[in-house]
Amino acid sequence: MAVDGEGRIVLTDGSKNRVRVRRFDEAWTSMGNWNLVSTAGVAVTGIAVDGDDLVLVAGWFRGELELDGRVLISAGAEDMFFLLLDLDGNVVAFEGLGGPKGERPLRVALDVYGEFRVQGMVDIGRDGRMSLFTLGLGVNGEVLDLNMIDGPDGRPLEIGSGKSDTKIVLDEENPEGLIEGQTDEENPEGLIEGQTDEENPEGI
């Protein structure tokens, strides 16, 4: 359950292959509901509301996950899903994120900048070991950053999805988990490979 700045309440309930997300006003009048239907299993693990009353619903699914004709396909045993709803109940983003093994978000919260943070676990494929990670999500459901909390030395964490263009690799050469085009001190303009500027007119 989560409550926004106007006292509106977001609840989830469901069964093995179906999750219902419901929103109510302060008088418990329904403001809409959304049904997430999976072919092999789905569960919600966290809900959060930001300062603009965007609602983030996070969880995991197996197989396919459908919402109003939009379908996500799991790339591995379990993938994460993120559903963003605006103040009027419109779907801002419905995204899946996962690799060949299994990933689960454990909880969601807001950081000191008011951005969504997700803590989760990823199967690193070694004797059933799971490793913790955190990732930041933007207001359009895009991945802002990815950080490994614990894991085997020298083994990169890679998360991608068959239904998403986002793919992040965290290893010794990219310890901050920067995605293509993301800015840091060495690349303050967020230039991607082949992009031109005054110092790089040929895009090399």
Image: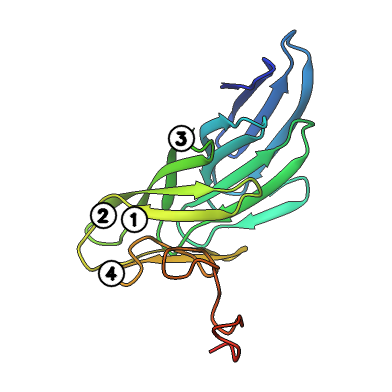
Considering only order in the chain, which callout, 1 or 3, is on the residue closer to the N terminus?
3
Position of 142 compared to 122: left or right? right
Considering only order in the chain, which callout, 2 or 3, is on the residue closer to the N terminus?
3
Q: Which residue is identified by label 4?
A: 172
Say if mark 2 contacts mark 1, CB within 8 Å.
yes
- Within 10 Å of disc 1 (Cα), the crowding (few <14, some 14-19, many 20+) is many
Under mark 1, the amino acid is Asp
Closer to the observer: label 3 or label 2?
3
Q: Secondary structure at mark 3?
A: loop
Depth order, front residue of 40/78: 78
Report how far apart the C-alphas of labels 4 and 3 lie in the structure. Answer: 27 Å
Considering only order in the chain, which callout, 1 or 2, is on the residue closer to the N terminus?
1
Quadrant of the drawing holding the N terminus: top right
Report how far apart the C-alphas of labels 2 and 1 lie in the structure. Answer: 7 Å
Q: Secondary structure at mark 1?
A: strand
Report how far apart the C-alphas of labels 2 and 4 lie in the structure. Answer: 23 Å
Q: Secondary structure at mark 4?
A: loop
Q: Does residue 154 appear in the picture of this structure? A: yes
Considering only order in the chain, which callout, 4 or 1, is on the residue closer to the N terminus?
1
Residue 128's label in the rendered image is 2
Q: Which residue is identified by label 3?
A: 112
> Residue placed at 55% from the left, 73% from the top?
191
Q: Which residue is identified by label 1?
A: 123
* Numbered disc total: 4
Under mark 4, the amino acid is Glu
Q: Residue 102 appears at what percent x and percent y?
A: 41, 55
> Residue placed at 74% from the left, 15% from the top?
25
- Within 10 Å of disc 3 (Cα), the crowding (few <14, some 14-19, many 20+) is few
Position of 11 compared to 128: left or right? right
> Residue placed at 78% from the left, 50% from the top?
69
Report how far apart the C-alphas of labels 3 and 1 lie in the structure. Answer: 29 Å
Q: Answer above or below: position of 189 versus 36.
A: below
